[in-house]
């Protein structure tokens, strides 16, 4: 039986940590940055955990 291919869009957006948690970039940090306040842009820095409700679906899309 052929191996399941991971969803190419999802594998670009989500990373698996060493402890097995899923991390993603926060939204609203790609364009129109002149409009957004510095405080808002700083708050959107870095990564955040994938929502608990989305984890099973994301894992399935990644083939985990």
Image (spheres, rainbow, N blue to C red):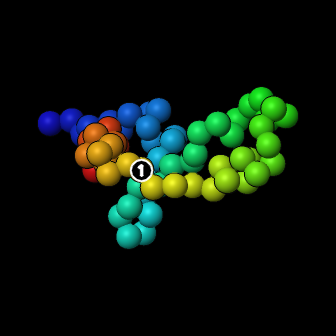
Q: Is residue 13 visible?
A: yes
Q: Position of residue 52 (x, y in %)?
A: 32, 51
Q: Position of residue 55 (x, y in %)?
A: 31, 48
Instruction: Give the quadrant of residue 8.
Output: top left
Query: For the residue carrying disc 1, how many other residues have a C-alpha within 10 Å: few (<14), some (14-19), or many (20+)?
Result: some
Residue 48, compared with residue 4, is above or below; it is: below
Q: Position of residue 62 (x, y in %)?
A: 34, 43
Q: Which of 7 and 33 is in front in this view?
A: 33
Please give left or right for residue 13 compared with residue 55 in the image.
right
Instruction: Report the residue at 57% width, 55% height from top.
Output: 47
Q: Can residue 63 be seen in this view?
A: no
Q: In which quarter of the image is the N terminus?
A: top left
Please give left or right for residue 22 compared with residue 33 in the image.
left
Residue 27, compared with residue 45, is above or below; it is: above
Q: Nearer the viewer, residue 15 or 35?
A: 35
Q: Position of residue 26 (x, y in %)?
A: 58, 45
């Amino acid at each position: 039986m052929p191996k399941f291919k991971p969803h190419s869009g999802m594998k670009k957006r989500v990373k698996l940590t060493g402890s097995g948690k899923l991390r993603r970039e926060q939204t609203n940090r790609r364009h129109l940055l002149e409009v957004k306040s510095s405080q808002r842009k700083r708050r959107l820095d870095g990564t955040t955990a994938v929502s608990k409700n989305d984890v099973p679906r994301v894992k399935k899309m990644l083939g985990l």
